[in-house]
Image (cartoon, rainbow, N blue to C red):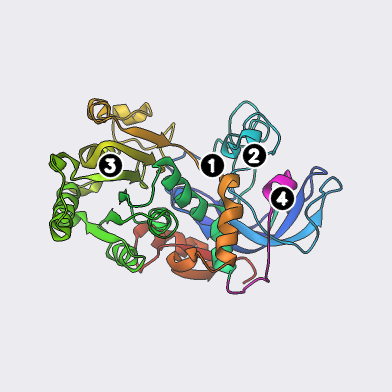
Amino acid sequence: MKAVVWRGERTLEIETVEDARLEAPTDVLLRLTSTAICGTDLHIYEGRMGQVNGMVIGHEPLGIVEAVGSAVVSIRKGDRVVVPTHICCGFCYNCVRGYSASCLITHPGSAGAAYGYPGMGPYRGAQTELMRIPFADANCLRLPGEPGDQWEHDFVLLADAFPTGYHATELAQVRSGDSVAIFGAGAIGLLTAYCALHLRGATEVYVVDYISERLEKAGELGAIPVDFRKGDPVEQILEQRSRLRKRAGVTWRGEEVMGGVNCGIDAIGFQARDRADLSREKPDQVIHDLARLINPNGRLGIIGVFLPNDAKPIGEIEARGELVVPWQTLFRKGITVGMGRDHDERYNTQLRDLIIADRAKPSQVVSHRLPLSQAPDAFQKFDERSDGYLKVILDPQR
């Protein structure tokens, strides 16, 4: 079968690899109809997660079940399913409590496993034609329809991007009437904005970035785009919120100290840009901005990835996997901080049903659908943030 294989820093090859096969009675084999490229895949592509020569990458699969293990009870051959990034057993201490991203069985000695991800188990990635799905009853979410229908791009986003965006709003406890600031307008940041506005009832959602096409998409989704090339994004948001409050004509005594936002979300992680020099990374840029912007008693959601071991750290502190965090400001303001990988199983069923009911359309962030054979070129353009490459879906059948 054909697969996207990592062969060095910014070097991917389309290679013929050994076919996936059933390895346990609880497995199924999935023939993929769509598989997406994630921003996290870029960390591998760029060599930031070390040397993983020969790894099949990717973790966002959608397809049709081709073979079923003898112990699988809820999935049948021919079922259309989407499979979460994080592989769970469904019965361990963490899984039964709703923490499927911290499964204790699928990667013994650690908490959590994933497809095509260094340090998260031996599982081959999803940018291929056929893949093995372990513990299929727990991991396969059955779907209506047929490959290539009106839901194809919506359903593939249930593997990771859509639940991750929703998880970010859970971490930040976004509620009706809240004001929200999201740093990062990649697919995750945009879907976080979409969830905050259309599923959680936020009143104002600001999305901070510097890529024009991404900011335009944020505006299309109903958010307020903030281009940090035009100045300090914190000051821009404070100014816009001040104008909105004056226009509303409603103020409360002492409200000046509440001129920020109720909820803040980091959807970038360790590769945040230094606003003073866009050619440089500054991993603690966003947390310092959010600490300035968040209102007293506000809530932060940190969904951007932070690596335990960055192969190309910018400094000694980052090499140790640490950041300088303004804890004194966060403590003084009484801020609640939530962070970590999303527990896909908590959300994907309800999000699927919202899609089917035409109450959610996450595929609005999809920019390209390309044959699997074009993955190397797609990765290059996605990594360069060029030509409007925002969320790319690969077609393994082309």
For marks 2 and 1, the one nearer the N-term is 1
Q: Residue furthest right?
A: 70
Label placed on residue 43: none
The reply to whether discs 4 and 1 touch (Cβ–Cβ < 8 Å) is: no
Q: Which residue is mark 1?
A: 52
User: Residue 4, can we see it?
Assistant: no
For marks 4 and 2, the one nearer the N-term is 2
The reply to whether discs 2 and 1 touch (Cβ–Cβ < 8 Å) is: no
Give the amino acid at mark 2.
Answer: Pro
Q: Secondary structure at mark 3?
A: helix
- Give the magenta-colored segment's residue range: 133-150
Horizontally, residue 351 falls left or right of residue 167, namely right
Give the amino acid at mark 4.
Answer: Arg
For marks 4 and 1, the one nearer the N-term is 1
Q: Which residue is mark 2?
A: 122
Distance Cα–Cα, label 4 vs label 3: 38 Å
Residue 189, percent from left and from top = 38, 53
Residue visible at 37% across and 56% down in the picture: 193
Distance Cα–Cα, label 3 vs label 2: 33 Å
Q: Is residue 144 magenta?
A: yes
